[in-house]
Image (cartoon, rainbow, N blue to C red):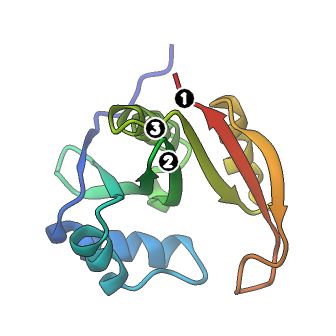
Amino acid sequence: MEQQEAVGFRFMTLADVHAVAELERLSFTTPWPPDAFVNELTRNPNARYVVVVNRENKVIAYCGMWVVLDEAHITNVAVHPDWRGKKIGERLMRKMMEVAVAYGAKSMTLEVRPSNTVARRLYAKLGFEERGLRKRYYSDNNEDAIIMWVTLQ
């Protein structure tokens, strides 16, 4: 059986903003700026953000979502390039699904690029199904977004 990396999960705090912004910069062509995360943490009552930390308590991944009524919407998810391929993303998504249920969500949705086959495979493994398309959703290259949904347990 594959050994899992020793990591911890916790809710994101303002002290994590710069580390999360760095993950964004390493992961996306149009990263969110640090002030967007500050706003999420301080002004959005629906926002829930979780970070993954390694043994040295360094942020190596994060995920954000909005929980509105009984639906959770994943806003962002990123894993540091050095930690990809180690099941961190899967464990983080499973944690987010648990958190969503704890906050009353019965379903979860997200958007994913058609070109992001690794993420699409992971989401399908977690039970997400493709339910729609947002045309020209991504501003960096006008790529469409596949809308995926899962019913939470």
Look at the numbered discs 1 and 2 and tell me whether their residues touch, using CB distance below 8 Å: yes
Residue 5 vs 49, above or below: the answer is above
Distance from disc 2 to disc 3, alpha carbons, whole Å, reads 6 Å
Q: Mark 1 vs mark 2: which is more N-terminal? A: 2
Residue 140 vs 144, above or below: the answer is below
Name which residue type carries label 1: Leu
Q: Nearer the viewer, residue 91 or 148?
A: 148
Q: Is residue 134 left or right of residue 109?
A: right
Q: Is residue 96 left or right of residue 137?
A: left
Q: Could you tell me residue 139's position as x and y percent?
A: 70, 86
State the residue position of label 1: 152
Look at the numbered discs 1 and 3 and tell me whether their residues touch, using CB distance below 8 Å: yes
> Residue at coordinates 29% horizontally, 78% vertically from top-left?
39
> Residue at coordinates 41% horizontally, 69% vertically from top-left?
23
Q: Nearer the viewer, residue 143 or 65?
A: 65
- Specify the label residue 105 is tagged with: 3
Residue 143 sits in quarter: bottom right
Q: Mark 2 vs mark 3: which is more N-terminal? A: 2
Name which residue type carries label 3: Ala
Q: Could you tell me residue 48's position as x and y percent?
A: 33, 54
